[in-house]
Image (cartoon, rainbow, N blue to C red):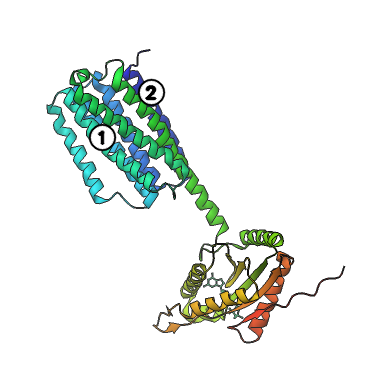
């Protein structure tokens, strides 16, 4: 079978068109994610670049090759900018932008050279952004979506293929007097580009969709203001903790915390300050919990804490630590006065997970009420409910 480069080029163009359509649809659904916008630019530039290579039938060959390769290089830079945005949420570092600019500028004088030299130089310059992109994915491989891995692999593949063609062009210049002749290295490169396009383009779209879905899930399960879990998912995690405690014969502690006199904080210092207090309180608590603890906002200025494998002494110790941390938060009111936040807490225990979630919440609520009634800024340990006779 003879591999005909123009035919593969047409296949590649169709691939870019398909990906462009998919990108347009996903961008509309995901409400303009910046990284997707850059990837779309990259896709359009690559499409234009490959079209330009095919336009050699109607435009002079040096123009087609130089313009084509320049557009391809710009497209790659846009891909890499999209990746950097997606992975690190920032633009490309200045030195990478400069390198991209240098590579693009170096393409123009190539018109003065013969085709083998042009092929060699283009093959050495074009892989540089792709190498940076592959490195970005490799560096972040443990923290990014798995669907981004094919993106890195695709970029690495295309960089390798280009470098291989560069080496081949350096050793066999006569082979490249017309790179569009059937068979050989040029066809292999275009086929590799097609595979890399499938891997990286569709992988990137998938990664963006995956991230958007996760962020929607996070929005649905977490409180927008404080970042703490909402009540419903927290209840589910409490039920799981109780099931585990039944198996391990360990104790689960549930702590209900209510900030003291929050209405007067709002009234005296305004809602914005009240919101800031809630946010800072949540951060303070979150920073001091174990990975297995569950922190949630039950509503208003009331928060819940599930402490698996914690007895009374352990739970009271955690609350005491939080009290000290709140006192040391260093909040300042608008008029420059230091503000000390206090809270009241009720602690209830479920030894061996025997007390169910509802009863545990009820007990903690009763203890919290006692703490408020006794003057606030204190913690009360709930007495176990008398076993119910049936
Ligand atoms: N700034 C702000 N205030 C909130 C938010 N959610 C609830 N609140 C306010 O929190 C206040 C709670 O007031 P109360 O339930 O009377 O309790 P309290 O003033 O804290 O008094 P005690 O609990 O008895 O110490 C109300 O004024 C609510 O408007 C919020 O998200 N932001």
Q: Quadrant of residue 7?
A: top left
Q: Where is 384 relative to 132, above or below?
A: below
User: Is the residue marked by circle 2 packed among few (<14), some (14-19), or many (20+) residues within 10 Å?
Assistant: some
Q: Is mark 1 within 8 Å of ligand 1?
A: no
**Residue 204 seen in the current view:** no
In percent of width and height, residue 206 lies at: 47, 40
Foreground residue, 163 or 250? Answer: 250
Q: Is residue 31 left or right of residue 56?
A: right
Q: Quadrant of residue 295?
A: bottom right
Q: Nearer the viewer, mark 2 or mark 1?
A: 1
Q: Which residue is mark 2?
A: 11
Name the mark on residue 126. 1
In percent of width and height, residue 91 lies at: 31, 50
Q: Where is 188 relative to 296, above or below?
A: above
Q: Is residue 217 left or right of residue 50?
A: right
Element on which disc 1 rests: loop
Tag 1 or tag 2, which sits nearer the N-term?
2
Disc 2 to disc 1, C-alpha distance = 21 Å
């Amino acid at each position: 079978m003879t591999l005909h480069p123009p035919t593969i080029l047409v296949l590649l163009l169709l691939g870019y068109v398909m990906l462009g359509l998919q990108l347009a649809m996903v961008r509309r659904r995901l409400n303009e994610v910046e990284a997707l916008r850059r990837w779309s630019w990259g896709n359009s530039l690559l499409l234009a670049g490959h079209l330009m290579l095919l336009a050699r039938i109607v435009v002079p060959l040096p123009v087609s090759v130089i313009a084509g390769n320049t557009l391809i290089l710009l497209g790659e830079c846009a891909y890499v900018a999209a990746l950097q945005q997606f992975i690190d949420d920032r633009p490309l570092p200045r030195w990478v932008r400069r390198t991209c600019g240098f590579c693009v500028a170096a393409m123009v004088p190539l018109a003065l050279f013969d085709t083998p030299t042009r092929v060699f130089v283009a093959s050495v310059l074009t892989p540089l952004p792709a190498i940076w992109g592959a490195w970005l994915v490799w560096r972040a491989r443990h923290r990014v979506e798995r669907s981004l891995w094919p993106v890195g692999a695709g970029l690495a593949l295309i960089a390798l293929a280009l470098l291989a063609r560069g080496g081949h062009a350096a050793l066999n210049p006569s082979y490249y007097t017309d790179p569009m002749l059937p068979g050989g290295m040029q066809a292999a490169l275009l086929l590799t580009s097609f595979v890399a396009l499938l891997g990286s383009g569709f992988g990137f779209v998938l990664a963006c969709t995956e991230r958007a879905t996760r962020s929607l899930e996070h929005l649905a399960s977490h409180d927008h203001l404080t970042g703490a879990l909402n009540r419903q998912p927290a209840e589910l995690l409490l039920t799981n903790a109780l099931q585990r405690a039944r198996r391990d014969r360990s104790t689960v502690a549930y702590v209900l915390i209510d900030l003291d006199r929050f209405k007067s904080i709002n009234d005296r210092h305004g809602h914005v300050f009240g919101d800031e207090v809630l946010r800072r309180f949540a951060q303070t608590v979150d920073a001091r919990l174990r990975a297995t603890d569950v922190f949630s906002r039950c509503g208003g200025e009331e928060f819940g804490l599930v402490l698996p494998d914690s007895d009374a002494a352990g739970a009271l110790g955690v609350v005491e630590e939080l009290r000290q941390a709140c006192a040391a938060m260093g909040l300042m009111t608008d008029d420059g006065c230091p503000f000390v936040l206090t809270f009241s807490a009720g602690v209830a225990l479920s030894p061996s997970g025997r007390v169910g979630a509802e009863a545990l919440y009820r007990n903690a609520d009763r203890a919290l009420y006692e703490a408020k009634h006794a003057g606030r800024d204190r913690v009360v340990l709930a007495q176990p409910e008398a076993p119910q006779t049936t």
